[in-house]
Amino acid sequence: GESGGESGGESGGESGGEGEGDGLDAGRVGGAEGEEDSLMGLEEYKKLMLEQMKRDAAASLNAGAEVGADGMPKEAPLPTSIIRPPTPLYSRFNYLSGLGAKLLASSPGMKGAANVLHEDKDRYAMTERDTSKKWMVMSMIEDIQVDTVVLANFEFYSCSPRRFQVLGSPTYPCQHWLLLGNFSAADSREEQVFNVTQPNMVRYLKFRFQTHHGTEHYWSLSLLRVYGQNQLDKFTTENAHRASLLER
């Protein structure tokens, strides 16, 4: 029952998965056995983006773009937050749909991991509850700035994800994963929506499931969706946001 799952998640989930979030996943990543991934620090990422923006600024000089003395475009500050489009999720494109998204890798013992990419409540990813590391790596059809993640487990007789991380990278295999967010899911059989706040452009995603709700023998996940904006979408949304501010 729901009450049993909640209390079980406190004991079984916490003890079984807490150490997992503190370490690094080791597994088959990009075909390299035992390769470890790590998180790129925010400052390191900002430095990389700053260098990229300076290169873009230099390239735009021929087009007459206004560039400051520091070599940066005067109207292109480093983004610090995500501006979401007003379009409701059901009208937006799911970048983890079966139309282009692919499962690239998953933790040992994970069965049916690709099922989370399909809108079928009778298909799901499954592994044993006590599996120490649970993760999946997905590819999307293009680089996007992820702004929303949707997760669901529709199975009543299995454990559900509780605490989980979403990581991203513009390349794969990669030495570093960017941490897009730490999230906590409820013990529910409904779709749950999580907002991503880190403004990073990525094409590859890693989902790392750290703890769980419930005490059943198996752990399952039915659905993952990801919504975001490509460069053109991002440009359009940000311009509309600036225009709305000027009108106030």
Image: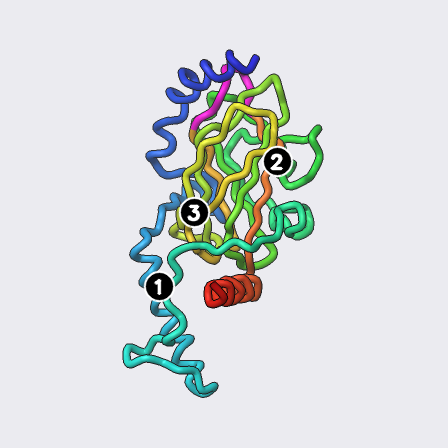
- Confirm or deny contact between disc 2 and disc 1 (CB under 8 A): no
Q: Position of residue 6 (x, y in %)?
A: 48, 17
- Contact (CB < 8 A) between labels 3 and 1? no
Distance between mark 2 and mark 3 Cα atoms: 19 Å
Other residues around mark 1 within 10 Å, as few (<14) / some (14–19) / many (≥20): few
- State the residue at coordinates (51%, 32%): 108
Q: Secondary structure at mark 1?
A: helix
Q: Give the quarter of the image for residue 58.
A: bottom left
**For mark 1, what is the residue?**
48
Tell which tag, 3 or 1, sits nearer the viewer: 3
Residue 61 quadrant: bottom left
Figure check: 69 above or below 32: below
Of callouts 2 and 3, the N-terminal one: 3
Q: Residues within 10 Å of mark 3 (few under 14, many from 20)?
A: many
Q: Residue 196 appears at what percent x and percent y?
A: 46, 46
Type of the residue with mark 2:
Leu
Q: Which residues are magenta?
A: 211-219
Q: Position of residue 206 (x, y in %)?
A: 48, 44
Residue 233 horizontal/vertical position (percent): 57, 62
Q: Nearer the viewer, residue 34 or 166?
A: 166
Q: Which residue is mark 2?
A: 223
Examine the structure image and report whether residue 35 is included in the region drawn in magenta.
Answer: no
Q: Disc 3 residue type?
A: Leu
What's the residue at 56%, 55% (across, down)?
A: 85
For this rendering, which residue is in front, 87 or 68? 87
Q: Residue at x 40, y 26 (%)?
A: 17
Q: Secondary structure at mark 3?
A: strand
Could you tell me how far apart the alpha carbons at marks 3 and 1 are, in whole angstroms? 16 Å
Viewer can see residue 211: yes
Residue beneath label 3, please?
Answer: 180
Label whose residue precedes the other's in the sequence (3 or 1): 1
Q: Is residue 125 visible?
A: no
